[in-house]
Amino acid sequence: MARKRIRQLIRRNYEYFSLPLGLLLFLFLWKMAAGFYEPFLLPSPAEVWARFQEFQRQGLLLRHLSATFFESFSGFCLAAVTALPISYILARNPFLEKIFTPYIVGLQAVPIVALAPLLVIWFGFGVTSKVLIAALTAFFPILTNGVVGFRGTDRRFRELMVIMGAGRKTIFFKLELPSALPVLFGGLRMGMTLSVIGAVVGEFAGAGRGLGYLVNTARGVFDTPLLFVALLVLAILGISFYLLVSLVEYLTMPWKRKE
Amino acid sequence: MAEPVIEVKNITLSFQPGTPPELAGVTFHVNEGEIVSLVGPSGCGKSTLLRLICGVLAPEKGTVKVYGKKAVPGCSGLGFVPQDPLLFPWRTVLANVRLPLEIKAGGQRDEEELNRQARELLQLVNLNGVENKYPHQLSGGMKQRAALARGLAADTRLLLLDEPFAALDTITRIQLHLELLRIQARTGNTVLFVTHDIFEAVFLSHRVVVMGENPGRILGEVSVDLAFPRNPKLMGTPEFSRLVGKVHDILEQGWGRE
């Protein structure tokens, strides 16, 4: 009887169980695998946790985390602020879109890893070059989704608004923007996570702070537990950004809830 | 005699220059307080004619006048109910009905006052208790009621409807016919109703204007001298059948000419 009830409980609430269960399984497999290797090749979860606490106590973690956070977040904002207006202009002018599309695709095809050293030479080892690299990585998904989103406005709705006597500004705020939002958020979510990658790539190319810099230095002295700490913190940063955009999405699109 | 509310004179329109015209020599009018149906096969240019009256299309030849002035978009007092309800999915039912009011009010507007007016309109079309729902949560009939309420917003005196009930089941459709007639009797609005349903056209109208296709043109007109308020039982009477037959005869003339 009791066993049946437990099974039912799990079946009904599996979405709450799946996440911690998966995490536990992952930690278990990791611990098992770590038994076969030297700590400098694959440290165990306990060793990484100990290194994390030690590093945390020295107050160094926050220093590196805040640098990467600032670079990726400002890079993302810069990308969004430039890419969204440009995407609107391109979506409304097929002629301009035809002219610029080849260049946009071409720029997007250049690996950001290859561009990063150049930007570091131009803008120095400081924060500026990292913000720019993060912005550049986040720029294109936001732009392309923006073009698709703004181009998707239903003509019949537009005509209806014209019949009601709406001007361009009203049509933008009451039709074009809300109807594009779901697609825009797709791009923003992608851009947000990509900006973290951009910031780390920038730090690889030359920096004195940040989680990417930490990965680089930890590798140099074979401090593999520290490298794992940096990787995990980076993953958490990326996930938090993703959740942040999802939260804003949830708040701005009440009509998409409960579907 | 008073000036007609809608005056369409000798309209000719092609989709592209050089192609056979979609509308050729279309002339008709709608008087103040009248309910007129435009009936014809699909593709005869009925909806195009409505877009001309709304001012979002311009004719090649001829004139379209609304309240004695050239038709332009955003004409005050004109309400439009499209074929699909076209309710904005990101707006609640109340906000959808409020939209024309918001546009008319422009920058300085009193939210509460607009909401009050929108609620009154929802009551007028008998749509209660759903003002905070989103369109996708409504049934087809409720959506059309909301679209009707929106069409009536912003002091509508002239209501244009483009096959608004075509997608509804017969029972819901008859309910909405009665609703439309009741509202018209109360407001005295002028109504132009586009449909491909002969029965609907005769049941609703003072006058049925019959259109033919290739090119779109007016074939004739039937005056419906049945008393208001109308009852659905009317559709079983010989008088009703005679009028439907008359419209049908006119439509048939159009088929003969290829």
Image (tube, rainbow, N blue to C red):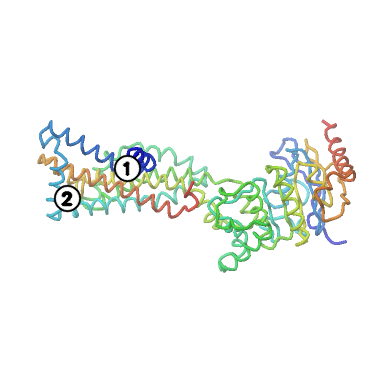
Q: Nearer the viewer, residue B38 or B137?
A: B137
- In which quadrant of the rendered image does the C terminus of chain B lie? top right
Left or right: residue B232 versus residue B111 is: right
The location of residue A23, given as percent across then percent down, is 26, 41
The residues tagged by marks 2 and 1 sit, at their Cα atoms, a distance apart of 41 Å
Left or right: residue B175 versus residue B30 is: left
**Chain at tag 1:** A
Residue lying at the far front in this picture: please name it: A1
Q: Secondary structure at mark 1?
A: helix
Image marks 2 and 1: residues in contact by CB distance under 8 Å: no
Compared with residue A24, is residue B183 higher up or lower down, i.e. above or below?
A: below
The location of residue B211, given as percent across then percent down, is 80, 41
Left or right: residue A116 versus residue B230 is: left
- In the figure, residue A25 lies in which quadrant? top left
Label 2 or label 1, whichever lies nearer to me, is 1
Identify which amino acid the numbered label 2 is placed on.
Gly
Q: Nearer the viewer, residue B176 or B12?
A: B176
State the residue position of label 1. Answer: A17
Q: Residues within 10 Å of mark 2 (few under 14, many from 20)?
A: some
The location of residue A143, given as percent across then percent down, is 42, 45
State the residue position of label 2. Answer: A208
Q: Earlier in the sequence, mark 2 or mark 1?
A: 1
Q: Nearer the viewer, residue B30 or B71?
A: B30
Marks 2/1 same chain = yes
Q: Residues within 10 Å of mark 1 (few under 14, many from 20)?
A: few
Q: Residue at x 76, y 38 (%)?
A: B41
The location of residue B203, given as percent across then percent down, is 81, 48
Q: Secondary structure at mark 2?
A: loop
